[in-house]
Amino acid sequence: MSSKTQNLIINNVKLPTDASVQEAFSVAESRLRKAGIKFSDAAFRIYRKSIDARMRDNIKFVYSVFVSAVFSNVTEKCLSAAGACVEKSEIPKPIYGNEPLKARPVVVGSGPCGLFCALMLAENGYAPIVIERGGSVSERVQEIEKFKKTRILNTNTNIQFGAGGAGTFSDGKLITRINDGMSLYVLGKFVEFGAPEEILYQAKPHIGTDVLCGVIDKMIARIEELGGEVRFHTAFTGADFKSTNISSITTVNGKLNVGALVLALGHSARDTYEILIGNNLAIEAKNFSVGMRIEHLTETIDKGMYGKMAGDKNLGHAEYALSYNTKERGVYTFCMCPGGEVVAAASETGGVVVNGMSESRRDGRNSNSAVVCSIFREDYGSDPRSAIEFQRKIERAAFAAGGKDYSAPIITFGDFAEGKLSREPSGVLPTYMGGCGVKLASPYDYLPSLVCDSIKNAIYDFDRKIHGFADRDAILTGAETRTSAPLRILRNDETRLAIGYDNLYPAGEGAGYAGGITSAAIDGIRTALAIMKKYKSSN
C-alpha cells in the first residue's frame, strides 16, 4: 500500500491499574513496529478503556489506542500481527434533496432522539420546531423535588417527561449495544456541550444526572441559536392521519403546520400511543421486560467484583451486567448505577414506577440496578393496547402494595427467597424517596409469579458470578416496567417513513427503534439525514 494518513486502532493493550497512559502508547507503538508497519508524524490517544476483572487479584485496564499517522505497509497480515484495525467512526454527511418543505419540520419529543434530530436539522438550515409536553430541565428538577415532598405528581413534567427525556434523570449512561460508527460522533457532541472528555474512551461512558442537566440546556440553546425552536408544555394531541401527507398537527396550544413530522416519542408516551393506535397507524406489539430494582451496599459489589483490589481509586466503583436464562425466558440486569439511588419514575396517576440514577461522582452508599424478566407477546395478548395495559396493571398493583401514596413496595432478598415478609431493612437501607417512601410488600402482590420465580433463581445465579449479590440484606424495590417501549411504529427501512405516509418519521426509543441514550440519538440523526435527503433546506 502507498503511504497515506490513516487512523488505526491497536486493541487489547493490557496494563496494571497504576500504569500511565504513556505506557499504553508505548505498547501500541512497539506492536506496530514489530508487525512491520512503518509510520511518521504519529499522534496517539486513548480510544477505549475497560476493566478486565476476571482475575480479581490481578485486575487490568484494557486499552484500545488510536493512532493517526502517515502509515505504510498497512496490510491485513500486518494489522493482524499488531492486533490492530482501521478506525471506522462515522461523521454524518448530509445529502440535500430537491423537494420543497411546505412548512418547518416539527419534532415531537425532546429526548436524545428528538434533540439530536433537531440539532442536525438546525445545523443544516432546516429551522425545526421541537414540541415537548413537559417542562425545561429546571422545571423538571422542581417538579421531581415537589413530588418527593408532597406526593403530588405532575403527569406532564416528571422523571419521564420534559427536556432531555427519561435519560436525563436516569444516570446519563451512554452504553450502547449497537455497533454503529456514529457512536463516537454522538459522544463528541455531548463533550462539546459540557460532558467530560473521558466519555470518548470509557467502555461504559457515563455523564451523571447532575452534569447531563447542563448539557441538555446547552443543546437546546444551540438549536435555538441556529434558528430552531423548542416549545415546552406543548403536548401533541392529534393530526389528520387520513392523509398520506400530514400538513398540520394539533397541540394543547393550538394548531401547528408541519412540513415533515418526526415522532421522537419516549417509551412512556401512552396517551400519544393511544392516538396513533386509534388512527390505525401500522403498529405492532413487541417483547419487553419487567421486574424490580435491587440495591446492595456499594462496597459489597466492589468486593464481589474486585476482591482485594476493591477501593482502588483507579478502578472506581464496580459495574456489572449480568444475564440468566431459564428454559422459557431471560432475566438480566439493566441500567446499573454504582453509588446511585432508586428514583420515583411514575408518569401516570395511581401507578408506581422505579428507575435508577447516579450523579457524576457516584459516591452514594448503595449501588443498584434493574433485575428484569422477559415478557413475550403471548404473555399479554399480542396487540399494542394489551402490552400497555400489562405494564399499567403492574404499576397500579405496585401503587396499591405501597399504600396508595406513591410509596414503593420493598422486600429484603432474604424474605423474598424464603417467601415471607418479616424483616425491616437494616444492613442495606432503601434510597427510594430518601428511604421514607417505602412499605414492606411481597413482589408476588404486583408482579406475575413467573417473573418473581425467574428473578429469584437469577439472583442466586448472579451470586455465583459476584459473591454477595444474593445478600439477605439486599433490597428489592418495585416496580420496574419502563425498560423499553412495548410497541413499534412500523417504518420503511430505507426512507424511515411510517408505513403509508409521505412525511411522517417515527424514530427513537418510543417508536421501538432504540434502547438507550446513544442509540436513540443515532436514530434521531439518521432520521434527520433522511429528511434532508428528501427536502430542500429553507436557507
Image (cartoon, helix red, strand yellow):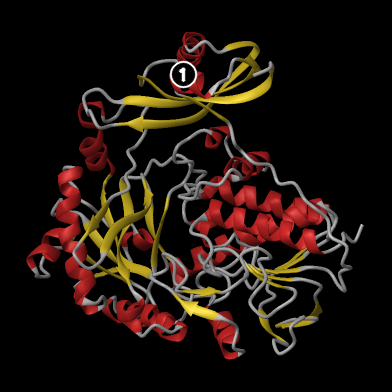
Residue at 35% in and 61% down: 432
Q: Position of residue 49 (x, y in %)?
A: 45, 30
Residue 196: quadrant of the picture: top right
**Relative depth, front residue between 56 and 490:** 490
Residue at 68% in and 61% down: 527
**219 relative to 290, above or below:** above
521 sits to left or right of 96: left
**Relative depth, front residue between 352 and 11:** 11
Q: Is residue 297 visible?
A: yes
**225 relative to 48, above or below:** below
- Which secondary structure, mark 1? helix
Q: How many marks?
A: 1
Q: Is residue 479 visible?
A: no
Q: Position of residue 490 (x, y in %)?
A: 57, 74
472 sits to left or right of 386: left
Residue at 63% in and 47% down: 215
Q: Position of residue 76 (x, y in %)?
A: 52, 24
Quadrant placement of the N terminus: top right
Residue corresponding to mark 1: 82
